[in-house]
């Protein structure tokens, strides 16, 4: 009699356990997914319009002007030491025109807004932190962010593109700077920038 009772009870217990696990498993998954989505979640980039990356090349001319009645470059921190040949520690804020050609009177493409500081004690090397803000065509309102070392007396300097906004979200790439002219008395300079950007 005891054997027959156990034979009947065991299948009932097993079936109830199966039903219970079937009910609880989705709840556990829902709970886990809610925890994962609390502050971070994985997204499908295709749903956000990031389908195919493309490489774009921009060539613009950067006009750094100290001497005009309305200068586009302004010293905000003077070098702590008057004896520094590299002006180590000095910082300038900029809102420099970016033009299509080398002449300042040529078509305005955008502006370089940010700052640079002298970061070299023995070599004239600047830390550049600036946004190229585009004002022309389909890129109007979009920006490219550049952050890097600029060894100003080298023929060609390379700096990373670390991001962007608008049509340049998730941008990455590099910028090459080549000085076209520099006035040692006024500090005015014209620099050609070739920017290569991967973006969506």
Image (spheres, rainbow, N blue to C red):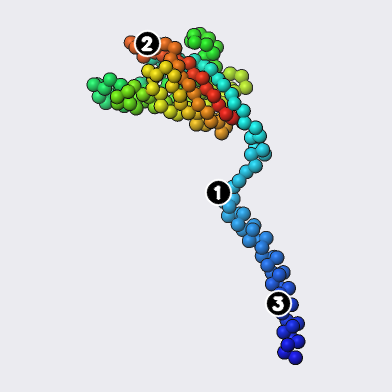
**Are dots 2 and 1 in contact, CB under 8 Å?**
no
Label 2: how many residues lie within 10 Å, few (<14), some (14-19) or many (20+)? few
Q: Quadrant of residue 77?
A: top left
Q: Is residue 56 left or right of residue 20?
A: left
Distance from disc 2 to disc 1, alpha carbons, whole Å, reads 52 Å
User: For mark 1, does the 10 Å Cα neighbourhood hold few (<14), some (14 to 19), or many (20 or more) residues?
Assistant: few
Residue under label 1: 39
Q: Earlier in the sequence, mark 3 or mark 1?
A: 3
Mark earlier in primary sequence (3, 2) = 3
The residue closer to the viewer here, 149 or 169, is 149
Q: Is residue 186 above or below residue 79?
A: above
Residue 7 point in image, percent of width and height: 74, 83
The quadrant in which the N terminus is found is bottom right
Figure check: 168 above or below 40: above
Which comes sooner in the sequence, label 2 or label 1?
Answer: 1
Asked which quadrant contains residue 82, the reply is top left
| Quarter of image, res 90 | top left
Name the secondary structure under disc 2: loop
CA separation, marks 3 and 2? 91 Å
Pointer 3 local density, CA inside 10 Å: few below 14, some 14–19, many at least 20: few
């Amino acid at each position: 009699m005891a054997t027959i009772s156990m034979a009947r009870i065991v299948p009932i217990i097993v079936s109830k356990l199966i039903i219970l696990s079937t009910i609880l498993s989705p709840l556990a998954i829902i709970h886990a997914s809610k925890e994962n989505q609390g502050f971070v979640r994985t997204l499908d980039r295709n749903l956000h319009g990031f389908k195919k990356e493309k490489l774009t090349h921009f060539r613009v001319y950067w006009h750094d002007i100290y001497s005009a009645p309305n200068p586009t470059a302004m010293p905000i921190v003077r070098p702590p030491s008057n004896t520094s040949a590299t002006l180590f520690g000095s910082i300038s804020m900029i809102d420099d025109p970016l033009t299509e050609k080398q002449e300042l009177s040529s078509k305005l493409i955008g502006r370089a807004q940010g700052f640079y500081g002298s970061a070299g004690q023995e070599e004239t090397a600047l830390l550049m932190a600036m946004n190229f803000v585009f004002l022309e065509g389909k890129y109007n309102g979009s920006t490219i962010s550049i952050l890097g070392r600029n060894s100003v007396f080298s023929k060609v300097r390379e700096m990373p593109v670390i991001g962007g906004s608008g049509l340049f979200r998730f941008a990455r790439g590099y910028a090459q700077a080549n000085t076209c002219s520099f006035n040692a008395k006024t500090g005015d300079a014209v620099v050609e920038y070739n920017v290569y950007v991967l973006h969506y």
